Image (cartoon, rainbow, N blue to C red):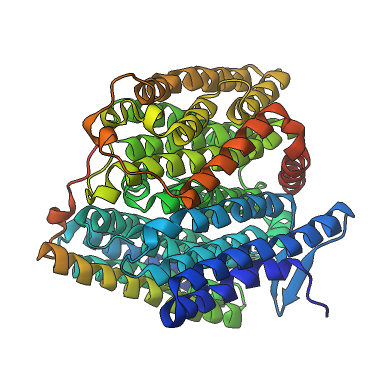
Amino acid sequence: MTQTTVLLLGAVGVLGVGLYGLLRLRNLIQIIVALQILAKAAVLALVVAGKASGHVNLGQSLAVTVIVADTVIAVVGLALAVQVRRRLGTLDVKALATLRG
Amino acid sequence: MVIPAFIWLIWLPLLGAPLVYLVGRLLSGWLARWTALLLLLAAWLPFAATWQAFARHETVAYSLGQVTLQVDGVSLLITAVILTLTPLIVLYSAHTLDGADGSEKYNAMLLAMGGSMIGLSCATDLFNLWLWFEATAVTSYLLVVFYHQQPASLEAGVKYLVQSVVGSVLVLFGVALVLAQSGTLSLTALRQQATPSPLLLAACALFAVGFGVKIALVPLHTWLPDAHAQAPSGISALLSGIVIETGLVALLRAMAALTAVTHTWGLLLLMLGAVNMLVGNLLALPQTQVKRLLAFSSISHIGYMLTGLGIAVTSGEVLGAQGGFFHLLTHGLMKGLAFLAAGALLYGLHTAVNDHTPLTIAELSGSGWRYPLVAVALTLALLGLGGIPPLAGFMSKWQILLAGMGSQQPVLMGFVAFAALNSVLSLAYYAPMVQMVFRREMSAVVQNGRSLPLTMNLPILLLALAIVTIGLWPGLVTRLTQGAGTALLSVIGNQ
């Protein structure tokens, strides 16, 4: 196995951790952390991809851009969490399952 | 280097967004609204210039460092729909926003969303495609939860955010795989270089699933009915009318660049389209809430577009792509109108009397006699969506049907026959709504309903006229749809 394969598999592993967290967790803040872990898997994959293809600069600049973009997502997510806590008095996502069908 | 006119199509709304916010915050909401409206109308000028340059077969592109934005037929079509719907929605929302909490953010976000969608349609590399899509998505999360006092909106927003972020992470992972394998992200370069390999095949799958979440491919559609039904009505119109369609364009662009990797993706589009049509229609049938029903019908309409585009990709039939893009255009107008009309009724019957529950179909009973204009417009939109001639929706579905039949391939003919049957099935939920609107006996809420302001009626009237006009003279938009169809076929190269 080449170094790239190992690193890419590592990124897939991180992706798996994030997805497992999403399915398992019930607290909205924890879910946002899981989303961040997912995004970090993609960042890792981009850096590895840049190195593997010989475009180190490209890979790293894409990674930095993604970090900015997913910070924005985290901010929006946390703002939502604040509102949920304020209106529903809980962060449990079970309280957010009223729309059906 | 001279900055080409089309850059202003992106800059005007994007730079306008903070301006509109500041004006709304510091001066008055009224002024902010007119600023937003003026900026959007002014954007038609660069559009006209771009259109002319495009008609002269010039390459309309702008490069900044390694990033290139380029206009093609698809971008022009998307831009035209955005520039038609957004100003109407600014006008439409004016009355409902008065005094609403955070109303200064609404128009600013609307502009930012429009600008980033136009940017998306001009992107020429995979990463830019992703980035513009994220910008659109972030603004749409915020707009979906505009009524953040209501728990249902928060719930819709959380579901939308979580599912959409997972989708975009998968797309990004796909981008990384493409970069690792081929060392380039430019769509043109990929088209020439990409060769079949397991990594690129995995990237294709990631794009299909990732963008699939954004365009609500069944079974990744569960966020859509919540988000589109809970958003403010003007936003629902935009989300259903154009946001999911730009996701479709992003998917097409990404997959088209990797055509060499998998020749069967046309068939995949057709099959996903068929599932979307059937499931969307079946789920819409038992709905009792007006906006939720319309949201489910968007899922099935994505299916029709996929059918048209799938025909084009499989058989190289330009008519299929043209039909798919024509349906994108007519669906944008019809679904936009349907949501605006339903939203106007929701406003007149519920919101204006301080009732924040969703509007049900039973409550529409007799509303046609109280709100004739809105009711006629809603009827036109619903019958158009159901594909009744001579409305716009019939014309676009007909073109897809012709393309499928014209290909002379049994598989494609089967798929369009299925689409036609689904179109008939969809009338099973459109028609009862129309019948309910024109019933003799008025429901209690209709009797207590408030009158609607002119700013709500005017956009509804304009969109209704547009649907009838396009239905009677479909030739008016042929150059737009033809340009988009040709652009798609030129990138996949007739195999």
Quadrant of the rendered image containing residue A17: bottom left
Residue B292 appears left or right of A60: left
Does B331 appear above or below B51?
A: above
Q: Position of residue B210 (x, y in %)?
A: 45, 53
Q: Position of residue B205 (x, y in %)?
A: 49, 49
Which residue is more in the foreground, B360 or A33? B360
Q: Residue at x 62, y 78 (%)?
A: A55
Q: Residue at x 17, y 46 (%)?
A: A98
Does A13 appear above or below B438?
A: below
- Residue extending furthest right? B56
Location of the C terminus of chain A (image quadrant) = top left
Q: Position of residue B208 (x, y in %)?
A: 49, 48
Numbered circles on residues, count = 0
Location of the N terminus of chain A (image quadrant) = bottom left
Q: Could one spot residue B344 in this view of the protein? A: yes
Q: Residue at x 66, y 23 (%)?
A: B404
Residue A39 appears left or right of B483: left
Which residue is more in the foreground, B222 or A98? A98
Quadrant of the rendered image containing residue B144: bottom left
Does B438 appear above or below B58?
A: above
Q: Position of residue B421 (x, y in %)?
A: 50, 17
Residue B193 appears left or right of B163: right
Q: Could one spot residue B176 in this view of the protein? A: no
